[in-house]
Amino acid sequence: GFLHYVVTDCEFNSSKLNDIEYTESYYYNKLEIIRFSSSVGKFVGYTEVGIKNAERLNNGPEVIARRAQKESYCLGNVGIDVESALTKS
């Protein structure tokens, strides 16, 4: 069979919004085919199919929705993680 999965990640150095990077990577059979990165601000394809899909996604509403994920998905969760780590150290 074939395996398709998505990995969503928030990397951060502090709980400030400009210190957070949101990424969403799409894999097919363990090979990353496309990624959205908030630091780049668009989808980037790594395979022939990924490049075609990145172009389509960057010209549609999906790219605007992903740009908002840094604030809506990461910011609150990063604040919780930082607070949790500080209270346990």
Image (cartoon, rainbow, N blue to C red):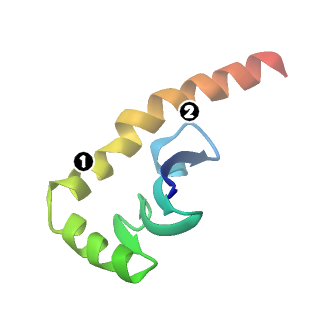
Give above or below for 7 relative to 39. above
Question: Which residue is at 37% across, 74% downward?
Answer: 50
User: On the image, numbered disc 2 is attached to which residue?
Assistant: 78
Q: Disc 2 or disc 1, which is closer to the eye?
A: 1
Q: Position of residue 13 (x, y in %)?
A: 65, 46
The image shows residue 57 at horizontal and vertical percentages of: 23, 64
For this rendering, which residue is in front, 77 or 30? 30
Q: Amino acid at mark 1?
A: Ala
SS class of the residue under badge 1? Answer: helix
Image-based side of 87 in relation to 37, left or right: right
Between 74 and 13, the residue placed more toward the observer is: 74
Residue at image point 51% right, 40% down: 16
Q: Is residue 45 left or right of residue 83?
A: left
In the picture, measured across the screen, residue 19 lies left or right of residue 44, that is: right
Which residue in the rendered view is the most extreme toward the left?
A: 60
> Distance of mark 2 from mark 1, alpha carbons?
19 Å
Check disc 2 and report its element: helix, strand or loop: helix
Q: Is residue 50 left or right of residue 19?
A: left
Q: Residue furthest top?
A: 87
Q: Residues within 10 Å of mark 2 (few under 14, many from 20)?
A: many
The disc placed on residue 65 is: 1
Amino acid type, mark 2 = Val
Name of the residue lying farthest toward the bottom: 48
| Tag of residue 14 | none
Give percent across and percent down for residue 44: 39, 73
In this view, the residue in front, 80 or 63, is 63
Q: Earlier in the sequence, mark 2 or mark 1?
A: 1
Q: Residue at x 46, y 43 (%)?
A: 17
Which residue: 65% across, 21% down? 83
